[in-house]
Amino acid sequence: KTAVFATLLASAAAFAPSANKAGSSALMASPYENEIGALPPIGFWDPAGLSRGKDEATFARYRAVELKHGRVAQLAVLGYVFQEATRFPGDLASGLPFADVPNGLAALTVVPVLGWVQILATVGAVEKNGYLGSFEVGMPDLDAETLAKRQTQEIQHGRLAMLATLELFRHDMSNGADGLGEQLITGLPFLY
C-alpha cells in the first residue's frame, strides 16, 4: 500500500505548479528595449545577452556594426541575383572576362591575387576611416516618427538580408545535396 501511495503522490507532483524562482533571462527588461529596431510582439531581441551590462557607447557601436553588416548582406543578395540575370561587359582582370566568372561562392576561386589585394585595401580603408554612410547630402527631411520608422525598416531589412545571405551560402556549399537542386541559385528560371 505504501508503494502505491508513494507512486500516486509522485505522479501527482509532476502536474503540480512549480514555485516561481527569480532567475535571469535574456528576455528580461533591458535598458535598450525602446531602441530603434525593437518590434512587437518580441520587442528587444537579445537572446545571447550581448547587450547586458554594456554602456550606451558600446551599444551604439554594436548597432553601427549591425547596420554595416546588414548593408553588406543586402548587396550580397543583390549580387547573387544580378549575376544570374546579366554580366558586366569586359574583363575582371587581364584575360579573365566577366562572362567566365562562375556564380556564387565559386567566383571566389577565380579572383586574381591583385584583385584580393584591392578588395582588402578598400575594406581596410573604409574600416579605418569608419565611414558608414551618415551623409548630410541626400538626407530626407523627415519628422522624428517617420525617421524612426524608416530606421527600423533599414535594420529589419538588413537582418533579413543577413539570413538570406547565409542561406545562399549554405545552398552553394550543399551543391544540391539538399534536394532543392542546382536550379535554385544557378539558373533562376523566373529571371529568364
Image (cartoon, rainbow, N blue to C red):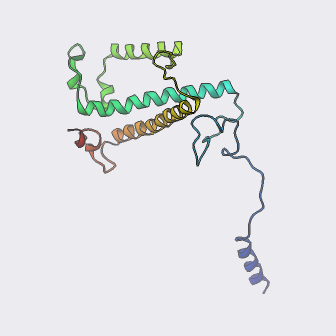
Could you tell me residue 60's position as x and y percent? 62, 26
* Residue at 73% in and 75% down: 12
Compared to residue 21, the image places residue 50 above or below, namely above
**How many numbered badges does the structure rendering display?**
0
Q: Residue 74's image quarter? A: top left
Q: Residue 91 appears at what percent x and percent y?
A: 22, 17
Using the image as rendered, state which of residue 96 and residue 154 is in the foreground.
Answer: 154
Q: Residue drawn at (50%, 26%), measured in percent from left and top?
A: 68
Q: Residue furthest bottom?
A: 1
Q: Quadrant of the C terminus?
A: top left
- Image quarter of residue 9: bottom right
Q: Is residue 144 left or right of residue 75?
A: right
User: In the drawing, does residue 68 fall left or right of residue 82?
Assistant: right
Which quarter shows the N terminus? Answer: bottom right
Q: Nearer the viewer, residue 2 or 53?
A: 53
Q: Quadrant of residue 113?
A: top left
Q: Is residue 60 left or right of residue 6?
A: left
- Residue under the point 74% across and 66% down: 17
Comparing 9 with 67, the one in front is 67
Query: Percent x, y for residue 119?
Result: 39, 17
Q: From the top left corner, tell me how far across and down residue 157 is, in percent.
A: 46, 36
Indicate whether 159 appears above or below 92: below
